[in-house]
Amino acid sequence: MRRIYESDAVERDRSDPFRPGDAEEGVEPQAARSITSSAWSKRLLPHWLRHRVVTVDVTAERTHVGPAESVPFTVTFTNRLPIPVSVEVRSPLLWTWSVDGHVEASRVPVHDPPDGTAYLNLDRGERRRFRREWSGLFRISDREWDRADRGEHTLRVAVNVADPDGKGLADETTITVE
């Protein structure tokens, strides 16, 4: 490449904008000003719209299982807009899952997550997936677990906002223990 430039094979002319010129000394490129996608969403999209464009979906790999058999499930959050969206949540814990109303299938009182707001940030058209597993057991004390009764159990996922059902930020599926 050096020979090409030294041989004058490339014609240089400062007056013609379509011909390459020599690099000017001391000129630094200027960075384009930008705003983060979450800041853009927070300032321009109303809360009610942010809640409507994010969908929550939970699917279990198997809906019929034996006693104490594990149930892998997938949680999917999707942004349906072609622009980034940020949903404000009540704590650093962005979402929770529960079985029959017991958070993470535990009958032991769960400690509340620390106070403070956080954001579930989804880029434009982003689909974010999480994989979890319910062991088919309920925690009844710090060291004891109990098998789930035969019958239907409801696996529910919700974004950690006030009234996730009313805002459409929750989903559930039914698992049958045979």
Image: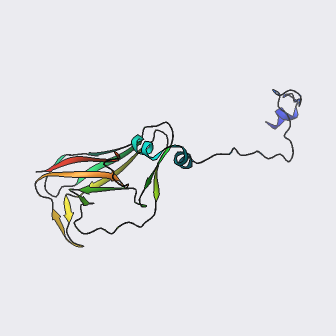
Above or below 80: residue 149: below
Q: Position of residue 8 (x, y in %)?
A: 88, 30
In this rendering, the count of numbered labels is 0
Q: Position of residue 137 (x, y in %)?
A: 19, 61
Does residue 55 appear left or right of residue 102 in this picture? right
The foreground one among 85 and 162 is 162
* Residue at x-position 46% and y-position 38%: 125
Does residue 74 appear left or right of residue 137 in this picture? right
Q: Position of residue 20 (x, y in %)?
A: 82, 31
The foreground one among 54 and 49 is 49
* Residue at x-position 33% and y-position 56%: 96
* Residue at x-position 40% and y-position 56%: 94
* Residue at x-position 20% and y-position 63%: 138
Above or below 91: residue 20: above
The foreground one among 107 and 13 is 107
Q: Position of residue 84 (x, y in %)?
A: 50, 43
The foreground one among 57 and 177 is 57
**Quadrant in the picture for residue 54:** top left
Image quadrant occupied by the N terminus: top right
Coloring basis for residues: rainbow
